[in-house]
């Protein structure tokens, strides 16, 4: 069975663990430039694409919000969509690839208007046929997140997306 766990400490994503359900192996990715002491772990940096992935997972398990993310250029949705298209190393380390070398995230995430080839926003959601919501866990400070914690986490991830725009407006003022 496939399993995805996102671990947050002090409101920030610190680790992702993914089991593809075929090999039974658990892939671990640690936040930072390298896996560090976790020699067999992948790594990721806190980019807008990673924030988009975190927000998408949080929304998928929270039944109190929309279970998708969407946005235009520069949004978390567009950043994650771009990363899925380009298959950077952090995504292949995090989710692995099929026999053809295609990252499994492409099966996990459904995309509308990928790479923004048409006018309008990109919309991303979890493919429940590949990764049922029940197999996604959000762990906050060592404990499975409550609905309230999921909402707070979602809002915090969305607020981070708004920060660069707010800073730009402050500089223009």
Image (cartoon, helix red, strand yellow):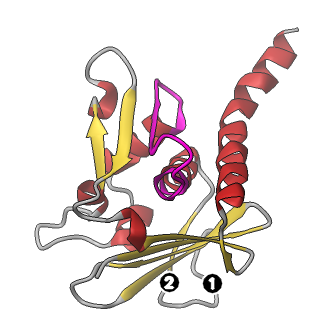
Residue at the outermost left position: 100
Is residue 59 magenta-colored? yes
Q: Secondary structure at mark 2?
A: loop
**Left or right: 113, with 43 as reference point:** left
What segment carries the magenta color? 57-76
Residue 165: image x %, image y %?
71, 24
Residue 126: image x %, image y %?
35, 53
Q: Is the residue 23 above or below the residue 156 in the image? A: below
Q: Is the residue 93 above or below the residue 57 in the image? A: below
- For mark 1, what is the residue? 36
Q: Which mark is residue 22?
A: none
Residue in the picture at 41% in, 69% down: 134
Q: Earlier in the sequence, mark 2 or mark 1?
A: 1
Residue in the picture at 63% in, 84% down: 36
Q: Are marks 2 and 1 in contact (CB under 8 Å)?
A: yes
**Left or right: 108, with 165 as reference point:** left
Q: Is the residue 140 above or below the residue 156 in the image? A: below
Name the image quarter holding residue 161.
top right
Residue 94 visible, this angle: no
- For mark 2, what is the residue? 41
Residue 74: image x %, image y %?
53, 29
**Left or right: 101, with 57 as reference point:** left
How many C-alpha atoms fall within 10 Å of the one at disc 2: few (<14), some, or many (≥20)? some
Looking at the picture, tell me which residue is in the foreground, 79 or 120.
120
Looking at the picture, tell me which residue is in the foreground, 64 or 154.
64
Quadrant where the N terminus is found in the figure = bottom left
Is residue 160 magenta-colored? no
């Amino acid at each position: 069975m496939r399993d995805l766990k996102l671990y947050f400490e002090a409101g920030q994503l610190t680790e992702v663990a993914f089991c593809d359900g075929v090999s039974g192996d658990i892939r671990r990715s640690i936040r930072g430039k390298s896996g560090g002491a976790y020699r067999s772990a992948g790594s990721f940096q806190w980019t807008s694409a990673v924030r988009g992935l975190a927000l998408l997972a949080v929304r998928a398990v929270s039944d109190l919000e929309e279970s998708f993310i969407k946005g235009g250029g520069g949004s978390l949705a567009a950043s994650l969509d771009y990363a899925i298209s380009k298959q950077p190393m952090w995504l292949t380390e995090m989710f692995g690839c099929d026999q053809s070398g295609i990252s499994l995230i492409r099966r996990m995430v459904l995309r509308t208007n990928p790479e923004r080839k048409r006018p309008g926003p990109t919309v991303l959601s979890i493919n429940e046929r590949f990764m049922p919501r029940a197999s996604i866990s959000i762990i906050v400070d060592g404990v499975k997140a409550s609905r309230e914690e999921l909402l707070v986490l979602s809002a915090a991830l969305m607020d981070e997306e708004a920060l660069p725009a707010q800073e730009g407006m402050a500089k223009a003022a």
